[in-house]
Amino acid sequence: EKIQMRKIPDNVAFFFSKMINELSEDVRTALRVMSCFGSSSKISLIETLEQALNSPLARYLDVAVSEGLLTKSDGRYHFVHDRVQEAAYDIMKSEDRCLYHFQYGLALCSTNIFDMNDDVIFT
């Protein structure tokens, strides 16, 4: 709704990037994490990452929901548009992306080895 109320410029990606950059660092970080997992993420995946990364990601993703960048339904967070996911992903420098993916993958593996739960790994 908030996105629909704003005048969207021709360059949609620029609009979403500007909107994301106006958010707090914590919210941008949570969006960056989620963007590494595609257009949507299970809440259970976010909860697992919260434990592994020692960060309250859901709290910050809920802020993004209130800002109109995400929706929360059916046990998942969803980016409202693929350009929002791209803008969140572009927060990372291209040379750092592999490092972030590795860090999140390692966090999921180390958490799930002890739980003997491979559901999160195949998200």
Image (tube, rainbow, N blue to C red):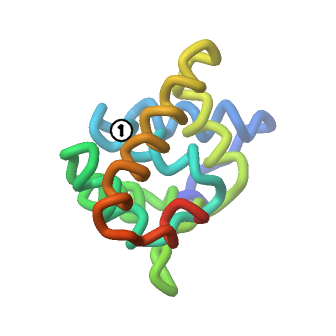
The answer to whether residue 10 is left or right of residue 94 is: right
Tell me the amino acid under the disc marked 1: Leu
Q: Is residue 29 visible?
A: yes
Dot 1 falls on a residue whose secondary structure is: loop
The residue most toward the top is 95
For residue 51, above or below residue 65? above
The residue most toward the bottom is 74
Query: What residue lies at 58% left-to-right and 52% top-to-bottom?
Result: 37
For residue 35, above or below residue 119? above
Query: What residue lies at 35% left-to-right and 49% top-to-bottom?
Result: 110
Q: Residues within 10 Å of mark 1 (few under 14, many from 20)?
A: some
Query: What residue lies at 29% left-to-right and 62% top-to-bottom?
Result: 114
Locate residue 57, reporting x and y percent. 29, 53
The answer to whether residue 42 is left or right of residue 115 is: right
In the foreground, 117 or 104:
117
For residue 66, above or below residue 86? below
Residue picked out by circle 1: 23
Locate residue 53, reporting x and y percent. 27, 43
